[in-house]
Amino acid sequence: MLEEIKARLETSVPGCHPEIILNGSPSGQHSLQIDSAHAVEAAMFLRDDAELRLDYCSNVTGVDWLETDTSPGYLEAVYHLYSMERKHGPVVLRLRTENRTDRAHLPSLTPVWRSAEFQEREIFDLYGIIFDGHPDLRRILMWDEFEDHPMRRDYVEPDDYEYEPTAHDEVLSKAKQHAAQQPD
Amino acid sequence: MTSMTTSPDEQMHEGLIADGGQDELLEIALGPHHPSTHGVFRMDVVLDGEQVVRLKPVFGYLHRNHEKIAESASYLASMPYTDRLDYICSLTNNWAYALAVEKLAGLQVPERAEYIRIITAELTRLVNHTATIGFLTQEMGASGTPLMYAFREREKILDLFESLTGSRMMCNYMRFGGCRVELPTGWLEQTKKVVEEFPRFLDEYEQLLTGNEIFMARAQGVGVLKRDLAINAGVTGPMLRASGVNYDIRKVDKYGIYDRFDFKIPLGEHGDVYDRYMIRMLEMRESLKILNQALRDLPQGPIMDPKAKIRGFRPKPGEAYGRIESPKGELGFYLISDGSPNPYRYRVRPPSLINLTVLEDMCRGYSVADTIVIFGTVDIVLGEVDR
């Protein structure tokens, strides 16, 4: 199924070279990775193609992959697509940013599937992926003045912690660090 | 200009009078603390007179980063926490999470456990729909009576949950590869009795509401959601089916053993508030059909997969997306495993949040009073929206 979709994407969207990412779990849900430049066009094709008709984008997930020795790390948006008309799915799409810092941009698929609107906002809020072309990209769960992206793997809580009067365990070590940093 | 002598009422209308009341818009915040918002939820509404021009939902008041907490705990440790997502329907939350983990790890569920899961899930659907319709009538101004009738019936089912799981609402009942405890003695008989008596309540309730003139006036033709928009915006559950889309995951995925049961999917024609009410009513009757069949056929046997490990549970690296038809829509869990005891990524696909995408489209052009009613038929729980 996925091989077939890949071949049809290559012929219908010129320049698009999807890559099949295999999944080792018994679920057998393999995914298609698409480059950012052709993502919107490919998504339109998947939605409107008479045979596929993936008219329903169910779930959009952000994933953070930290840098390793071989790769600079990247952020990923995973789209789970189904067809309400033809009742098949899921087809899993993956988009990757170039890195985790200054080039964390992806094209927004909200113009294709509106169900991505709040979910992409959530990924922007919690992971810091900037979705170009999103109609209303604001923080959604955290407050507007908040600065960091708390779902990132390397997120560190700010030192504005309210310490318990009887600090113990983890709280005790945090309280000590906090006290050491405070000017007298 | 406002002066100290004008009353607040005059101040509010001053701008409108000054330019003849043509283009002056009024921005108000509905919520976050308002009985009709089902929790802490705010709608920033722009009004032209009484009509809604713009509506922006604002949430996050209950945000505790459930997903991050789950990523720093073992797989099983998140199970009781799923109860707190949609706290009206904890058993379906349990099931959705268990289903995703079972897909990830390739676990099988014994037949008896599948039956028990279906019985508890359909009872949960009754609980949710009675509560939703009760709240809806409350929001239409029918103070007390219909809500209390609904809660009286809901309480009978919560008693069943309490005797089975030890808790009325925070059930924490399902495990990867089965269920936690065997049914207590007398539970089946009691459940059969509740299921048997339930249609009488539904008849009484329908007599009260379905043909009620005031109810019809407030509900018919209000908050219409078009079929194509509903599909594109990812709306699921009773809301989607009220717009006439035949999509029920119990029929599409046939997860568990839903393919063994004979039941129908009610569909609406107009996609208005009345259809969304009616779909829930009809769905309860279909749930009762499933319950009757499941209670009749419940086999003997184990309730846990003997291969399932409670301690030292480490699925192989990989990922899985599992979804069920929760009473509110498609509830899904997406898990990525890196082979460690904790999930690398744990994601909840909340139906409540995504069904709110179309709130503005449904409310535009209607009055504030209608907005409250339309919002009531979306059926959200903030524990799930904010996570």
Image (spheres, coloured by chain):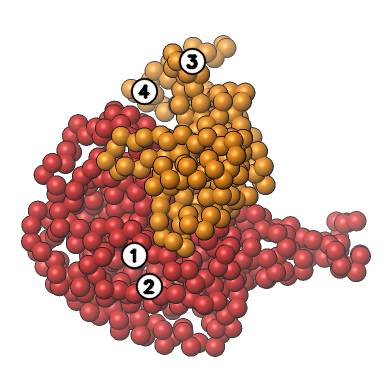
Same subunit, tags 1 and 2: yes
Residue at label 2? B265
Asked if marks 1 and 3 touch (Cβ < 8 Å), the reply is no
For label 1, the residue is B251
Label of residue A179 in the image: 3
**Residue pointed to by mark 4:** A170
- Answer left or right for B40 relative to B21: left
Point out residue A32 in the picture as x, y percentages from the top left corner. 45, 39
The amino acid type, in three-letter code, at marker 1 is: Lys
Label 1 vs label 4: CA separation?
A: 48 Å
Horizontal and vertical percent for residue A181? Answer: 52, 13
| Lateral position of residue B62 relative to residue B161, left or right | right
Of the two numbered discs 3 and 4 on the same chain, state the one appearing first in sequence. Answer: 4
Relative to the observer, which residue lies in front, A178 or A56?
A: A56
Cα distance in 3D space between marks 1 and 3: 59 Å
Chain letter, colour orange: A
Q: Quadrant of residue A142?
A: top right
Question: What residue sits 60% from the left and 71% below the top?
Answer: B223
Are labels 2 and 3 assigned to the same chain? no
